[in-house]
Amino acid sequence: MQKQISNLDKLTLSNDFLFKHVMLRKRICKHILEELLHTEIADITYLEAEQTIDVYPDSHGIRLDVRIADTANTHYNLEMQVKNPVNRATGKFLLPKRTRYYQAMLDTDMLQKGQDYDELSPTYIIFFCLFDFFQDSQRIYTFKKRCLENMNIELADEAVIMFLNTLGTKGDVSPDIQSLFDYINSNTINSNFTREVADTIVEIKNDKKVRDAYMTYEMRMKDLRDEAHAEGKAEGLAEGKAEGLAEGKAEGLAEGKAKEKTATAKRLLSMGLSVEDIAKATSLSVEQVEAIKAE
């Protein structure tokens, strides 16, 4: 049990679990949105925050990290992205189509049966990336749909996707956003805002409810790994014996281990855990987990 507690103490803001809990602090989250979008927001509310963050036995599907709506009914999805996932089989990076899928999830959830399309709310999908996906050193990459024949013509679907490159050096951002990037990259506190974020993280880590939730989260992952290991080993041995040869046994064991990891990954995906956490838990690569997720 002490191991899980010490693991929580070592988490930084780039960790999904901690990022979600920090973003649940309304003052911090609201300030980040205002600084990014250069606008004032009267208030924000959280949509399915508890289901997104906590791990429950009945969890299913893929959960968005942090979903928010403001008083103008603009919806936001904030995501922390530590690594740049790629499909090894195709060599294609997965992040662009992930944003497409997330947009579909937001829209499907908002538009109930019988509603008109114009009732869809404006949306912002915002990825905090610890890498420069587009290799252009921009601090922020903002995407809207435009006509290729005339780039001045915008498809006004009110859907915006933003990639925040914490390593960027080009483009203007507010001092607080830059200080947040510095804090994400190196835990450097160089502003009142990042001091507030750092103090909030200490408070979160000392919260018994959060510590209990993280311990439960870690133990559940271990139980799933152990269960899948036992199932995979049994399947591998059975297949190896069926071959009746030492080579067949070896192949069966190897396949059993592969099935074990795949089964664990699928279970953790169904619980809404991040690809990065699943990769750590199963010893699979991020790319392998992304491939399983795409099946």
Image (tube, helix red, strand yellow):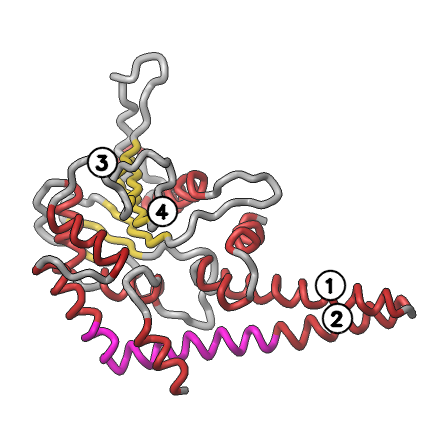
Whether residues under marks 4 and 2 lie with C-beta atoms below 8 angstroms apart, the answer is no
Q: Nearer the viewer, mark 4 or mark 2?
A: 4
| Amino acid on which the number 4 mark rests in the picture | Phe
Give 83 or 116, whichever is nearer the viewer: 83
Image location (x, y in percent) of residue 71 = 14, 48
The range drawn in magenta is 202-227
| Amino acid on which the number 1 mark rests in the picture | Glu
Is 101 placed above or below 151 here? below
Whether residues under marks 3 and 1 lie with C-beta atoms below 8 angstroms apart, the answer is no
Q: Residue at x 8, y 45 (%)?
A: 40
Q: Which residue is mark 2?
A: 235
Helix or strand or loop: what does disc 2 sit on?
Answer: helix
Q: Quadrant of residue 185?
A: bottom left
Helix or strand or loop: what does disc 4 sit on?
Answer: loop
Image location (x, y in percent) of residue 134 = 37, 36
Q: Which residue is mark 3?
A: 170
Q: Earlier in the sequence, mark 1 or mark 4?
A: 4
Q: Earlier in the sequence, mark 1 or mark 2?
A: 2
Q: Earlier in the sequence, mark 3 or mark 4?
A: 4
Q: Relative to 36, is 236 on the left or the right?
A: right
Q: Relative to 203, is 263 on the left or the right?
A: right
Q: Residue at x 8, y 60 (%)?
A: 192
Q: Earlier in the sequence, mark 2 or mark 3?
A: 3
Q: Which residue is mark 4?
A: 131
Q: Relative to 33, is 99 on the left or the right?
A: right
